[in-house]
Image (cartoon, helix red, strand yellow):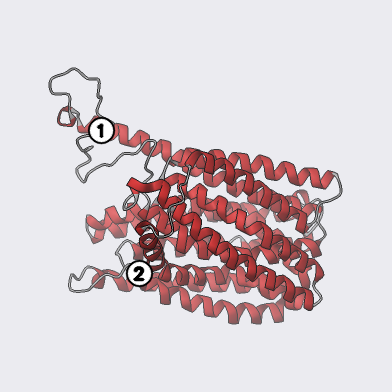
């Protein structure tokens, strides 16, 4: 839970401990302490704060999701299919490095920041900046080598964009680190304001490049990188991270804890990356970069529903944990009701997307990519399958057994490499759509099976729970 501005802690009875800022320090009543504050009043105050923080958190995610959606739509309209396909290919690779950053730096920060290191948050954030810059060096080196490899293979366009990515990705990841740090320090409102600045800077920069005739995949990455750098500096001015001496005990302790926390998370999230993004790596082998552009153009219209599910997923795990403590029946009921939400809404979106596929594609992309518009009937099912996988995955985590998700994610990842390769080879773009759906469906089924097998064992006190 965020510390700093609006920091508050509620105990298991719904009461705010003595000394909380929520007790009025100016009250002159003889017994105006927490003991005299009604639980109803406390609950109302807590609910308002949850709603406020939830609003800013959803706005933060919504702004960045909208920015990503908008820039992809604009680039698909303004760039040639070959160049946009190269941009998507490079972006898919950079997402993998973002997955590693999330597992080792971002997720542990949200756990340790408001808790273990709450009294030294500026120094702790400075320690993470050390770690981020060390990771910068590794990521940039890897992307530079990839750029060199693409150049040797004769893919000049992709090579130049990969080079631009090597220069921009560090600032993209720094902005992500500082934006997430807002949740552990000042609250999601600051993060949302950063998202607003980023949207304005990035979209206006892309438009200026387009109007001046300078827009390309590489220059688009340059605009993204500069926008992230500016937002990073602005967030840093508010967060004020303090770089501690490298010999500080906090530095060694934080690094050790982050590496210990992230070792399983890296594997799990890396395996999650494969079914979603491997298809972009295999499509150019037989279909060229134009096929990558066509597939991403279709997936752009699926992304709003995926972003909706990812945003709501932040509320699911705490809800499942509370239901688990009330008993197995309550937990099962909560899982079923969540499944209805996470499948019914995407199903309605799928029908709408399918019915309007041809005019929608033609209108959004200015007459481009219409030849494969019918595949939206297939790809539109992706959010439904993802919803099942997400709910069942969180259901397993709520029993404190995230280690069970490793094999549940490993099987679909291996299947994705095999099936998507075969389907793309024999079926091209349509094969890629079928391969993506089958692997996502397999993931949903496997995670559901693990959930069905889990409860009786997870509630056995003789079993030792493992934490990621």
Quadrant for residue 27, please give it. top left
Callout 1 touching callout 2 (CB < 8 Å): no
The answer, for residue 59, to whether it is visible in the render is: no
The reply, left or right, for residue 449 in relation to residue 305 is left
In the image, what residue occupies the spot 64% across and 43% down?
199
Q: Nearer the viewer, mark 1 or mark 2?
A: 1
Query: What's the distance in space between the residues labelled 1 and 2, CA to CA?
Result: 36 Å
> Along the line of sight, which residue is nearer the eye, 325 or 348?
325
Residue in the image at 67% along x and 63% along y: 166
Q: Position of residue 207 (x, y in %)?
A: 77, 44
Mark 1 Cα-neighbour bin, 10 Å: few <14, some 14–19, many ≥20: some
Tell me if I can see residue 188 in this picture: yes
Q: Is residue 151 above or below residue 249?
A: below
Q: Residues within 10 Å of mark 2 (few under 14, many from 20)?
A: many
Query: Relative to the observer, which residue lies in front, 356 or 124?
Result: 124
Residue in view at x 50 percent, y 76 percent: 412
Quarter holding residue 46: top left
Lateral position of residue 331 relative to residue 186, left or right: left
Q: Tell whether 250 sits left or right of 71.
A: left
Q: Which residue is mark 1?
A: 42
**Residue at x 76%, y 60% (from the top left corner):** 84
Name the foreground residue: 369 vs 53.
53
Q: Position of residue 394 (x, y in %)?
A: 38, 61
Extreme residue in the left direction: 30
Residue 354 point in image, percent of width and height? 65, 57
Residue identifier under label 2: 451
Q: Which mark is residue 252?
A: none
Q: Disc 1 or 2, which lies upstream in sequence?
A: 1
Residue 338 drawn above or below residue 156: above
């Amino acid at each position: 839970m965020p510390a700093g501005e609006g920091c508050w802690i509620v105990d298991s009875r719904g009461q705010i401990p003595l000394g909380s800022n929520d007790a009025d320090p100016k009250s002159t009543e003889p017994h105006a302490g927490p003991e005299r504050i009604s639980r109803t009043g406390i609950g109302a105050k807590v609910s308002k704060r949850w709603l406020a923080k939830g609003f800013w958190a959803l706005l933060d995610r919504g702004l960045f999701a909208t920015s990503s959606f908008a820039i992809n739509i604009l680039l698909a309209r303004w760039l040639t299919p070959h160049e946009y396909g190269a941009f998507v290919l490079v972006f898919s690779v950079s997402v993998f490095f973002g997955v590693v950053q999330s597992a080792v730096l971002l997720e542990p920060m949200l756990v340790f920041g408001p808790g273990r290191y709450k009294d030294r948050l500026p120094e702790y954030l400075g320690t993470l900046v050390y770690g981020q810059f060390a990771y910068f060096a590794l990521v940039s080196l890897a992307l530079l080598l990839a750029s060199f490899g693409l150049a040797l293979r004769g893919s000049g366009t992709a090579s130049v964009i990969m080079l631009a990515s090597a220069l921009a990705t560090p600032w993209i990841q720094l902005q992500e680190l500082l934006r997430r740090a807002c949740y552990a320090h000042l609250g999601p409102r600051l993060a949302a304001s950063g998202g607003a600045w980023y949207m304005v800077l990035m979209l206006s920069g892309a438009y200026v490049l387009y109007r001046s005739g300078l827009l390309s995949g590489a220059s688009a990455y340059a605009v993204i990188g500069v926008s992230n750098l500016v937002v990073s500096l602005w967030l840093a001015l508010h967060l004020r991270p303090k770089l501690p001496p490298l010999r500080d005990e906090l530095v060694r302790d934080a690094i050790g804890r982050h590496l210990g926390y992230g070792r399983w998370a890296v594997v799990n999230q890396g395996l999650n990356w494969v079914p979603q993004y491997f298809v972009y790596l295999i499509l150019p082998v037989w279909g060229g970069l134009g096929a990558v552009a066509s597939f991403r153009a279709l997936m752009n219209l699926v992304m709003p529903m995926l972003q909706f599910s990812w945003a709501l997923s932040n509320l699911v795990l705490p809800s499942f944990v509370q239901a688990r403590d009330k008993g197995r029946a309550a937990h099962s009921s909560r899982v079923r009701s969540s499944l209805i939400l996470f499948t019914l809404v995407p199903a309605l979106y799928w029908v709408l997307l399918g019915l309007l596929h041809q005019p929608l594609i033609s209108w959004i992309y200015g007459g481009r990519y219409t030849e494969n518009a019918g595949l939206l009937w297939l790809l539109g099912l992706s959010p439904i399958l993802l919803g099942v996988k997400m709910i069942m995955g969180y259901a397993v985590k709520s029993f404190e057994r995230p280690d069970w998700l490793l094999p549940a994610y490993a099987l679909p990842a291996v299947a994705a490499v095999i099936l998507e390769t075969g389907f793309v080879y024999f079926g091209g773009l349509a094969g890629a759509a079928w391969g993506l759906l089958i692997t996502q469906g397999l993931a949903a089924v496997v995670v559901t099976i693990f959930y069905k097998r889990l409860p009786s064992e997870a509630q056995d006190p003789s079993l030792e729970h493992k934490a990621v």
